[in-house]
Amino acid sequence: MDQEETSDPAAAAPPPQAPVPDDRVTCRGTVGPLKENWQQWSSDHQASQKQNPFSQQVCGAPPTGLPQRGQRGYGRPLEGSMTERRGRDAHTHVGREVEELCAAIRAIGRRGEEGADAGLGGTGAGDRGGAAARGTGSVTVEFGRLFEHYVTISNKLVGVLLRARRQGLVHFDGEMLWQGQDDRVVITLRQ
């Protein structure tokens, strides 16, 4: 008898399901705002791409509001932008690192006497005011000693040295200094 109960097709049929509510009215009400939001985003995006000099110039229009070559502000970030602020912050940070470098050279270097460092300046890249520095008894330190001291302050010593040389604050021979190889190169502080 058990076999008859299991083979009954009515017993194997799924129970009837409840009728599905008609959601078309609800969908119509929520699609409208979504469409409006999408259109607003699309319009905003097109407007921002017109301002973006790296876009493919949406709608064939040239970027508006951007300075053209030869105008004031060309090649600079837009005033008040985050890029401008980051650039100012980076410039300030590098300036502080150059000041720390000069302070470290003053702290561990030897003060030369009047005219003692006359053979050190005058021909290097970034050489500004060589004659003025020679007459004032500038401070000198070897790169190896500066590297040993400065490595606890910053790991960017060579980059900061190059920046300081471009600003005319220090002088050393050669384009680049390498640890070990250039440990005997004399660095002269010109302030």
Image (cartoon, rainbow, N blue to C red):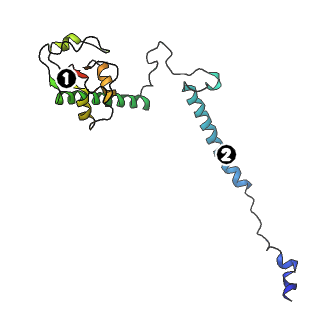
Quick check: 119 above or below 94? Answer: above
Residue position marked by numbered label 1 in the rendering: 140
Number of numbered labels in the structure image: 2
Q: Residue at x 26, y 27 (%)?
A: 143
Amino acid type at mark 2: Gly
Task: Give x and y (percent) for residue 41.
Answer: 60, 38
Gap in Å between the C-alphas at discs 2 and 1?
74 Å
Q: Depth check: 85 or 151 in front?
A: 151
Residue 163 visible, this angle: yes
Residue at the farthest bottom position: 1
Quick check: 189 above or below 4? Answer: above
Q: Depth check: 143 or 111 in front?
A: 143
Which sits earlier in the primary sequence, circle 2 or circle 1? 2
Give the structural element (helix, strand or loop) at label 1: strand
Residue position marked by numbered label 2 in the rendering: 32
| Label 1, residues with CA under 10 Å away: few <14, some 14-19, many ≥20 | many
Q: Residue at x 58, y 26 (%)?
A: 50
Task: Give x and y (percent) for residue 77.
Answer: 44, 25
Amino acid type at mark 1: Thr
Q: Residue at x 30, y 14 (%)?
A: 124
Residue 81 visible, this angle: no
Asked if marks 2 and 1 touch (Cβ < 8 Å), the reply is no
Residue at the farthest front position: 181
Instruction: Answer left or right for 87 relative to 182.
Output: right
| Label 2, residues with CA under 10 Å away: few <14, some 14-19, many ≥20 | few
Quadrant of res 129: top left
Quick check: 81 above or below 72? Answer: below
Give the structural element (helix, strand or loop) at label 2: helix
Instruction: Answer left or right for 78 relative to 39.
Output: left
Q: Report the quarter where the C terminus lies.
A: top left
